[in-house]
Image (cartoon, rainbow, N blue to C red):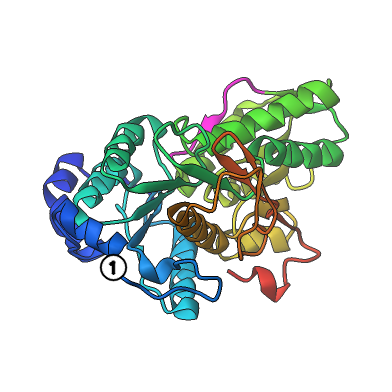
Amino acid sequence: MKKRILSAVLGIAMVATLLVGCGSGSSDDSSKEDTKTEDTAKDDSGEKTAADYKIAVVPKMTNLAWFERMEQGVDDYNEANGTSVEYCGSPEGDGQAAFVEGLISQGYDAICVVPFDVEALDPVLAKAKEAGIVVICHEASTVENMDYDVEAFDTLEYGAHLMEKINELSGGKGRVIQTVGALTSQSHVEEAQGGKEWAEKNAPDLKVDDQPIVSDDNQDTAYSKVKEALTADTKHEIVGIQCAAMSETPGAAQAVEELGLQGKVHIAGTSLMSVCGEYVEDGTVELMSFWDPALAGQAMIELAVATLNGTVGEDTLSLPVEGYENLTLEGKVYTGSAWIDVDKDNCNDEAYDF
């Protein structure tokens, strides 16, 4: 899935990619100002809507099924609301910062982004803010240069939830390994942290490795590294695997299945039925949790509109998106309650068929 492409080539091709991926837009600030000040239609409440603003949604990378689902959410939003929010980005996470920088001069009112590397992207977002662009993030609550971040749930609590399930399945004794897509992925690191902290507090006989396995958001890498760890575990101490990235859960399941460790090594992680369904159905993955990236994309759009309209900043906020109706604010982070648990007993529900 995720193979590195030459960053130099990406940098040279960035302008062309922007023109194709997000439209040519405007190359000067005066056009952006026109977008904001023209007399546009309003909804029934008198507030401007997404139809009145130029908004882009930028994923970590475009070549993952997770973000293809987010793209579907943006498409559905546009169809339902008569809007033209643009979904665009770099195929690889390493190209995201340069891609976003290329959007700054194109007249956007708001950029909604799921950061791949917070440290690399933050200086670019500072430039966007200086240009008067509203910046909305997802999966990145520590970004400095943003207006707001919106989360489907508290990631520390989510990680604790996954670890609690491993504890239940394993009898609370043994070794647990964790996987993350990248150490620069804040949400992944926080999920791992949440799981480890829960175990230390609530399951003293459940020992979580100090360092997670890094998969580069790649299923094959997750498979090979997890299989290596399981094979090296000659005392059979590993009883659980907590996976943060969508691609890692099926990779870990493949390793467990090949080594005949189903029912002995318990997997709880993030994924989607389209990616991990076979392993959920046969019970190799005993808990698959996720939030719908389609709805997360729509929540970012609605939060961008609310920010542009000046109707944010309260301790609570209601967005017209399922799971985001009762957001709470801490600092610059709005948090909802939108995670979903799937196992072999409910995995055939059509609601999870994506």
On screen, 233 above or below 179?
above
Span colored in magenta: 209-216
The residue located at (81%, 22%) in the rendering is 201
Left or right of residue 66: residue 286: right
Left or right of residue 91: residue 112: right
Instruction: Report the front residue among 342 and 225.
Output: 342
Quadrant hosting residue 56: bottom left
Looking at the image, can residue 178 be seen? Answer: no
Residue 113 highlighted magenta (yes or no) = no
Which residue occupies the extreme right position in the image? 171
On screen, 342 above or below 316?
below
Percent position (x, y) of residue 269? 65, 46
Where disc 1 sits, the SS reads loop
Which residue occupies the extreme left position in the image? 12
On screen, 37 above or below 182?
below
Quadrant hosting residue 8: top left
Residue 210 highlighted magenta (yes or no) = yes
Looking at the image, can residue 144 be seen? Answer: yes
Percent position (x, y) of residue 100? 28, 47
Crowding around mark 1 (Cα neighbors within 10 Å: few <14, some 14 to 19, many 20+) is few
The residue that label 1 is drawn on is: 38
Instruction: Report the front residue among 156 and 252.
Output: 156
Q: How many marks?
A: 1
| Amino acid bearing label 1 | Glu
The residue located at (32%, 63%) in the rendering is 54
Instruction: Report the front residue among 111 and 29.
Output: 29
Percent position (x, y) of residue 57? 39, 57
The residue located at (68%, 37%) in the rendering is 159
Left or right of residue 339: residue 222: left
